[in-house]
Image (cartoon, rainbow, N blue to C red):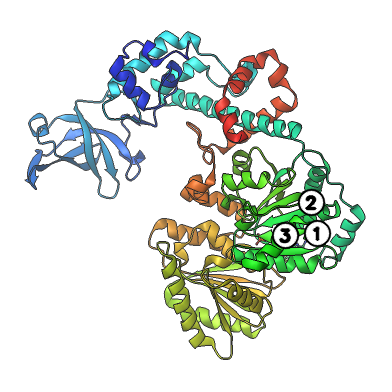
């Protein structure tokens, strides 16, 4: 019945039907689940409980004769003073000249509008003469298209509720609804559209948030299970002795978090299921080390491996370090967009002939011309920078290779689990021993000279420094000009006694490589750079990171940049030069100086900016929810995840009578399953 056309609902004629269709509403169910995006309440509150800029309703007596003035061609302003308890509040009403006749000194009125706490002033958008009734209704506000009137929409929703409530299936099993004290579905639906009290509305929302998260989690987890059980990946019988010898040859002992993650990865490799795993860890926590070991395991199992990274600089760096690590054990090659002509052809051929064991590169790795003979393992660094398309194309290469995604962006765990619900997640939540937290300072621009002396002091002690120049988002060209200017300026301060290098995205590949190598070899003491060094660059002797105009960067980016220092045993420093104007900017600087923990920081960032912005809306691929908010309602999200896991693991979803309706509902949604499947 709920799947019937919206035209079956009383009051929906042809015209309204097509208007509702435009809003994406086609069935009775669509209409019932078209929730308000906001609720306005005209409940009178005492002045002492109001907050600045809130939309408020107050009640009082008019104690001055309302004064009307005109300005512009047709604009008017009506002002009067309201006595509210012991306070005199100024009320201002724009362009409602007609109200002058209705409002008189001595009248009691109830007004609604934007509250200015500092000036004790209200900008009135609605008014009513007389005292407010104690139980003013809560007003739902819907997103509407032109032509559809709010009252009409409310009326047809009401008709649908009256006539179809009996058909609304209660998809949650009773035990869960009872355990979480959730109202039943028809009742909750009624409250969403016609809330009686704030409390009842809250419970109704709670129900739909949980329901929405649970359905999402069930679908994602079913999909993961399906992937694991049905895809035939490759078994990688790696050589344990060789692997152990390799791990022992490393100059450090793995942390227990690294060991745990490695064990999880190796387990996936041994199994015939295709690995689809996210390796997550704070900057410098040793993800690359784990990935390299896993790559080596794949080589000992007789397969080729690929490592795909977001920048050429990083590709170069990984190429060099893997080459050194795998000396005498495996053959490593580099492929980036700027390797062309004969050299490129040679590499491609060697890859196809399996003369190369490990190919390191940028996006170039997934182009059609690259053919692996025996690809078994693919690592993708900085996963969120790669689009879904690229992921898919990667998977399609070779023999359903095991895929490990690495991310240095510390996505809060709840979010990772939700967003990447079809992946397994390994977390490195521990830093290598002996690391000291980076000391972070926020200083104003006028202190630049002192910052420069500080750099000199660190260099005198044998260390090195990065200086990141301001970011100008609108223009790549300006970014580079900025870097060149800053480089000139710092060269004139520090050279010749202290060597300064310059790095930016437009340098030729050989230049980039040479600058990076000089810096890594401690021949350059100071590296002036754009954000191209943001991810992955590893020079443990660098102990100072100075960021000019730090207020222009987001928190996660600042943290990534800071992660370039503090990678060795020496005390490191991050200096944020900046004069943020707004509160958010100041808050960002403050958070940076207070925590070194990327996970905590990203939680804060999410609060400041919302999940979409954290990853860049387009690239995020994060699911959108109708009622729930992944950040605000993360507890419900976590609960739903656990419940879904239990239902799937214990097979209750499939076999328990009580879960029958829920199961039907989950399996009926081909849309989401289809989306995630391809
Ligand atoms: N267990 C360990 N003990 C000591 N040092 C380690 C350990 N693991 C890795 N390292 C060193 O710490 C530095 C950072 O490691 P790695 O590059 O693997 O981290 P990462 O998590 O990949 O960093 P980023 O996120 O910045 O790319 C490297 O110099 C590496 O050699």
Question: In this view of the protein, which residue sits in the foreground, 127 or 158?
Answer: 158
Viewer-closest of 611 and 529: 529
- Label 3: state its secondary structure: helix
> The C terminus is located in which quarter?
top right
**Residue on which the image places disc 2:** 262
| Mark 3 CB within 8 Å of ligand 1 | no
As displayed, is residue 352 above or below residue 672?
Answer: below
Q: Residues within 10 Å of mark 3 (few under 14, many from 20)?
A: some
The span from disc 2 to disc 1 (Cα, nearest Å) is 10 Å
Mark 1 C-beta closer than 8 Å to ligand 1: yes
Which mark identifies residue 349? 3
- Precedes in sequence: disc 2 or disc 1: 1
Tell me whether the residue at label 2 lies in contact with that at label 1, contact meaning CB atoms closer than 8 angstroms: yes
Specify few, some or many for label 2: CA neighbours under 10 Å numbering under 14, 14-19, or 20 or more: many
Residue in the image at 32% along x and 16% along y: 155
Tell me the SS state at disc 2: helix
Percent x, y of residue 356:
77, 60
* Residue 431, image x, y percentages: 72, 59
For the point 13% across and 36% down, the residue is 96
Q: Residue furthest bottom?
A: 496
Seen as rendered, the residue at the extreme right is: 241
Q: Tell me whether the residue at label 3 lies in contact with that at label 2, contact meaning CB atoms closer than 8 angstroms.
A: no
- Mark 1 = which residue? 254
């Amino acid at each position: 019945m709920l799947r019937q056309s919206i035209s079956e609902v009383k009051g929906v004629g042809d015209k309204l039907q097509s208007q509702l269709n435009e809003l994406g509403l086609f069935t009775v169910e669509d209409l019932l689940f078209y929730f308000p995006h906001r609720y306005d309440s005209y409940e009178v509150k005492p002045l002492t409980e109001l907050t600045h800029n809130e939309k408020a309703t107050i009640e009082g007596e008019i104690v001055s004769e309302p004064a009307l003035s005109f300005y512009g061609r047709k604009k008017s302003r009506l002002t009067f003073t309201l006595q509210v308890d012991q306070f005199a509040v100024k009320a201002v009403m724009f362009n409602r000249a007609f109200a002058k006749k209705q409002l008189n000194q001595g009248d009691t009125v109830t007004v609604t509008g934007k509250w200015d706490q500092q000036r004790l002033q209200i900008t009135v958008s609605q008014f009513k003469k007389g005292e407010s009734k104690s139980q003013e209704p809560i007003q739902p506000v819907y997103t509407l298209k032109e032509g559809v009137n709010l009252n009409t929409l409310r009326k047809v929703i009401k008709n649908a509720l009256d006539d179809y409530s009996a058909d609304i299936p209660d998809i949650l099993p009773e035990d869960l609804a009872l355990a979480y004290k959730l109202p039943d579905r028809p009742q909750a639906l009624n409250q969403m559209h016609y809330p009686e009290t704030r409390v009842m509305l809250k419970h109704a929302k709670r129900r739909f948030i949980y329901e929405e998260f649970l359905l999402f989690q069930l679908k994602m987890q079913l999909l993961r299970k399906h992937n694991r059980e049905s895809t035939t990946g490759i078994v990688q019988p790696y050589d344990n002795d060789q692997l152990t010898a390799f791990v022992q040859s490393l100059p450090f002992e793995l942390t227990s978090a690294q060991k745990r993650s490695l064990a999880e990865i190796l387990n996936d490799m041994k199994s015939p299921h295709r690995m689809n795993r996210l390796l997550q860890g704070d900057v410098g926590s040793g993800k690359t080390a784990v990935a390299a070991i896993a790559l080596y395991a794949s080589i000992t199992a007789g397969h080729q491996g690929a490592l795909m990274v977001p920048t050429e600089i990083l590709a170069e760096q990984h190429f060099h370090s893997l080459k050194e690590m795998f000396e005498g054990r495996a053959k490593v090659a580099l492929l980036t967009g700027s390797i062309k002509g004969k050299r490129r052809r040679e590499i491609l051929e060697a890859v196809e002939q399996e003369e190369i064991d490990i190919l390191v590169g940028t996006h170039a790795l997934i182009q059609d011309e690259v053919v692996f003979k025996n690809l078994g393992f693919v690592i993708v660094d900085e996963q969120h920078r790669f689009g879904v398309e690229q992921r898919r194309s990667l998977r399609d290469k070779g023999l359903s290779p095991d895929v490990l995604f690495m991310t240095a962006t510390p996505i809060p765990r709840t979010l990772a689990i939700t967003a990447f619900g079809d992946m397994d997640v390994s977390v490195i939540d521990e830093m290598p021993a002996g690391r000291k937290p980076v000391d972070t300072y926020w200083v104003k621009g006028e202190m630049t000279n002192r910052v420069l002396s500080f750099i000199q002091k660190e260099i005198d002690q044998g260390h090195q420094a990065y200086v990141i120049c301001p970011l100008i988002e609108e223009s790549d060209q300006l970014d580079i000009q900025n870097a060149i200017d800053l480089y000139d300026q710092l060269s004139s301060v520090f050279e010749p006694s202290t060597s300064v290098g310059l790095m930016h995205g437009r340098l030729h590949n050989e230049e980039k490589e040479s600058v990076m190598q000089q810096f890594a070899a401690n021949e350059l003491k100071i590296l002036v750079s754009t954000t191209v060094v943001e991810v992955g660059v590893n020079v443990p002797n660098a102990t100072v990171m100075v960021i000019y105009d730090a207020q222009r960067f987001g928190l996660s980016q600042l943290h990534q940049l800071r992660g370039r220092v503090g990678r060795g045993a020496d005390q490191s420093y991050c200096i944020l030069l900046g004069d943020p104007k707004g509160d958010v900017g100041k808050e960002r600087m403050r958070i940076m100086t207070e925590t070194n923990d990327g996970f905590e920081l990203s939680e804060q960032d999410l609060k400041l900016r919302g999940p979409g912005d954290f990853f860049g809306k387009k690239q995020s691929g994060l699911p959108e929810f109708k009622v729930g908010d992944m950040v605000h309602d993360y507890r419900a999200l976590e609960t739903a995840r656990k419940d879904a896991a239990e239902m799937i693991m214990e097979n209750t979803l499939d076999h328990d009578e009580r879960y029958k309706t829920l199961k039907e509902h989950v399996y009926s949604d081909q849309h989401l399953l289809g989306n995630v499947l391809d």
